[in-house]
Image (cartoon, helix red, strand yellow):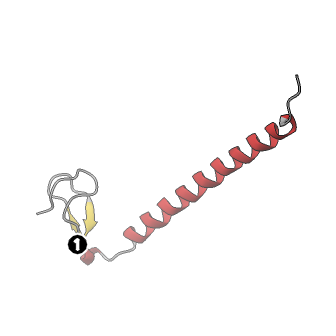
């Protein structure tokens, strides 16, 4: 039996793995940048959740950790 795409299997698998790694790294970098952006805000622009104590942005309606409404 002849397999016409036999020579493409390994490069496609390697390409797929590379795409997964690049996507993961880009996602982690975006999370880290977002985390740093929130942490760099002055404390006057932050409010604390009365239920769990998590620091949230001043304009937040719901807590980013527990999801309860910020009073």
In this picture, residue 7 sits left or right of residue 14: right
Residue bearing the label numbered 1:
59
Classify the position of the C terminus by image quarter.
bottom left
Count neighbours of disc 1 (C-alpha within 10 A) and say few if under 14, some if 14 to 19, many if 20 or more.
Answer: few
In this picture, residue 69 sits left or right of residue 57: left
Please state the horizontal and vertical placement of residue 41, each as a whole percent of the image: 35, 75
Q: Quadrant of residue 8?
A: top right
71 vs 4, nearest the viewer: 4
Placement of 67 over or under 12, stated as above or below: below
For the point 21% across and 56% down, which residue is it?
53
68 vs 55, nearest the viewer: 68
Label 1 sits on a secondary structure element that is loop
Q: How many marks?
A: 1
Q: Quadrant of residue 54?
A: bottom left
Classify the position of the N terminus by image quarter.
top right
Please state the horizontal and vertical placement of residue 27, each as a whole percent of the image: 53, 56
57 vs 39, nearest the viewer: 57
In this picture, residue 23 sits left or right of residue 35: right
Placement of 3 over or under 62, stated as above or below: above
For the point 23% across and 58% down, which residue is it?
63
Please state the horizontal and vertical placement of residue 11, each as a whole percent of the image: 81, 43
For the point 21% across and 68% down, which residue is it?
47
Please state the horizontal and vertical placement of residue 52, each as a whole percent of the image: 20, 52
22 vs 12, nearest the viewer: 12
Q: Quadrant of residue 35?
A: bottom left
For the point 49% across and 66% down, which residue is it?
33
Most distant residue in the left direction: 71
């Amino acid at each position: 039996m002849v397999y016409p795409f036999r020579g493409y299997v390994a490069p496609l698998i390697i390409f797929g793995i590379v795409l997964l790694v690049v996507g993961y790294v880009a996602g982690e970098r975006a999370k880290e940048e977002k985390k740093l952006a929130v942490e760099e805000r002055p404390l006057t622009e932050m409010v604390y959740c009365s239920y769990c104590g998590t620091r949230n942005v001043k304009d937040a309606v719901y807590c980013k950790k527990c999801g309860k409404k910020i009073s």
